[in-house]
Every structure is written in C-alpha cells, then in structure tokens.
Image (cartoon, coloured by chain):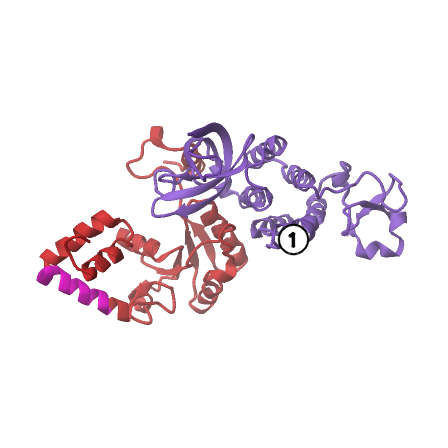
Amino acid sequence: MIEWREEGMVLAVRRHGESDAIVEALTRDHGRHAGVVRGGGGRRLAALMQPGAQLQFAWRARLEDHLGHYAVDAVRSRAGVLADPLALAGLTSVTSLLSFVLPEREAQPGLYEATMTVADLIEHGGHWPLAYLRWEMGLIDRLGFGLDLSRCAVTGSREDLAYVSPRTGRAVSRAGAGGWADRLLPLPLCMLGQGPAVPAEIVAGLRVTGHVLGTRLAPSLGDRPIPAARDRLVARLSRPA
Amino acid sequence: MSDGSDRIQALIDLMARLPGLGPRSARRAVLHLIKKRGALMRPLAQAMLDVADDARECLVCGNVGTDEICAICRSDKRATGEICVVEDVADLWAMERAGVFRGRYHVLGGTLSALDAVGPDELRIPRLESRIAEDGITEVILALGATVDGQTTAHYISDRLAGREGLSVTSLAQGVPVGGELDYLDDGTIGAALRARRAL
C-alpha cells in the first residue's frame, strides 16, 4: 500500500456515486492530486468539501497510478469569504485556475507557498488584488508562458516601458511601440512594481495575464475556455467603487 | 438470480439504481413488494405510471407537479410580493415542509459552477428577472446553499437585481442550527454565526 500525508487546499469537488466525492487538492509535494473521499458527498463532510478549504489529506492507494482514497481532516475552512462577493470571486478564481492549468501530480512547492499567501490575504481582507495579480504572473511564469518585462523588446531600453506584446509577452517602450501602440496591450506600472495599484491598474494587469491565459496557455490544454470564475473576478474589480 | 425469473431480477436492478438503495436493499424491497402485491405493489405501480405520465415542471416557477402551473403559483394567497429563490425542487419542498414562508418560489435548476461549466444561461435567471418585473415583486429571498457555488450564485443574482426600484434582495441567515452545540461546529459556521449576531 502506498500512502502519504500532507496538508493542502481543496481545488475542486465532484460527486462520486451516491455519497462519495472525488476531491482535487493542491499540496506542496504532490501538486494537484485527486482522490476519492468516502462520505465526501454527504452532510457530515459538506463543510470541508468546499473549494479553498485547507485540509489535512492522507492518501492511500494500492498502486502509485491508482486514483486512491483520501482521508481528510479540517485545518480551516476559509468559509469567511462566502459573505464577501469580491473575496469569494478571488478565491474561486484561484482554485478554478489551478484546477484548470496545473498538470496532475507534479510537485509545486513554490506555487503552493504563493497560493497559500494569496489565499490567506483574500481570506483576511485588506488589499489583496495586487497580490492576486502577482500570483497570476507567477503562475503563468511557472507554466512556461511568463512575461518578460525587464526591457523593451524593440529598443532594449529599460525606460518608459508602456506596453506588452500580445504575441511574445515581452515589454515594449513607448518609443519602441511607435505606430503599433494600438495593437499592444497597455502595461500598468503595478506590474513593474511601481506606482499605486489602483483597481484600474490591477484590471489592466489582469487583461495582460488573461490574454496569456486565453491565447497561449488555454490552447495548449485542449483549447477549453479559461474558467468563468476568473471573468467574474475581473468584472467585479472593474466596477467603480 | 438463483431462485427467480429474469423479470424479477430486472426489477431489482432498476430499484438498485434509486438513491439510497443498493443491490441488497433493492432485493429486500422487491421481496417486500411481492409479499404485499395487492396492498402495495399494484397501487405503487399505478401511482408511478400516473406520475410518469403527468409529472411536469411548473411553467412559472420550475416546481414539479402534475399541472402546467403549480398550486403555489395559482394561489392568490401566495401573491405576497415575495419570491424565494432556491437551487432545486428538493429545496422548495423543504421550505414548504417548514411551513414558514407564504410567498412564491423560483427554482433555479442548479448553481453557477466552474467545474461543471454551468453559467447563468443554464439557470432560470432571466425568467426570474421577468417575473420580478411582471408580478410586482418587492422582495427576493435568496435561499441558496452556504457553499462556494451557492453563494457565488447568490452574489451574482444580487448584482443582476441591484438598482431595481422598490425591490429588496435578502438571503437566509447562516449560523448555529437548532440543536447545535458550538463545540461541534466548524470554524466557518461559527464565524458566520458571529458575523450575523443580533442584539437581544
């Protein structure tokens, strides 16, 4: 029997039969990993079987490539976000994006830490949208579609970077853009770690990462649309305060 | 089956597909029905045939009944200006069992779900909006589950209905259930209960 025990976050839950559930979790050492939770479709475990909940997972299977079974124990539920529409949109965007893009059973210790940080910020309120944007930038970077915002792709300059090429994901300066500016994505300063991260800047940043997710990453995953939960987050952040 | 016909086995197989029943309990149920053939099995079969022929969704609210418009939607006494929005017919029946709500219902037919790719177009949200406009509704009570999908749907509907004059959108309270002890509650429920505290 193969088994391991690790803390992780619930990404997705699907009913399995009458009373069980297949739970997809993000763990530090086993990445996105699924398993059957006996009774996971029932009332007793309902509070734990929610995306975003932090649980202790004990996975057991006869062979390594089997789906296996999880025994779960509560660490904390993160249910506080349910009453806050923006926080709920943020947390569901995190869990559904991870479920959408991550390969199964590949250890992601860096991403796990970054995800715990952003999930905790979302749960406890405060100014988390910039942290979320940076988390998305880190996510696409780890998956090999990272942006190169270090210098202008045309002139090589590090000054006055104002756009991102939608094709290459590289920064372009105002001078380098010339007459092509209207075909480039605006680069908000908050993506360079400069200036105030006002909601409009965050949304502009999410348009850049969303473009990469939709046009470069999604096609490599079978061309499914990126999760609607992310669209709902962007729509909510786009509203005037 | 070792001691019976294929038709009895076929009945057991069908019964075993019902929620709450497995092959063993289906076998017991079928044996019981056979023993009570006249008193139970024939009336049950007739009732199932009748419902199979007549059951339909209410054209107004989505409740399940045998008429085009269900009794709740037909009753003038239920025209209180309140609509209770529920996820499923089972939730509507649960509310009716409680007997505390005297308005009308709207069954969404599910919740927004990223995993199952259920979007607003798959739910009866546009029909809810038209009912609010047509029926002079003054309060929409969102009675959706305290789950991530349920509350995402509640916030989504609340946003869609925001700004309508004379309409208030409310949701069920969350917290300590009747008979519940704090020691046995999860941290999320305790947190929700504390946030929803009220003066005594």
SS for callout 1 = helix
Quadrant where the C terminus of chain B lies? top left
Q: Which residue is mark 1?
A: A219
What residue is rendered at 43% in x and 43% in y? A22
Question: Is B16 above or below relative to A98?
Answer: below
Q: Which segment did they paint magenta?
A: B37-50
What residue is rendered at 40% in x and 55% in y? B87
Quarter of the image for residue B182 reads top left
Q: Residue A95: image x %, image y %?
A: 55, 42
Read off the chain for label 1.
A
What residue is rendered at 18% in x and 64% in y? B45
What residue is rendered at 89% in x and 53% in y? A178
Prevailing secondary structure class for the magenta stretch in the rendered image: helix
Quadrant where the N terminus of chain B lies? bottom left
Letter of the purple chain:
A
Q: Residue B10: image x %, image y %?
A: 23, 59
Amino acid under disc 1: Pro
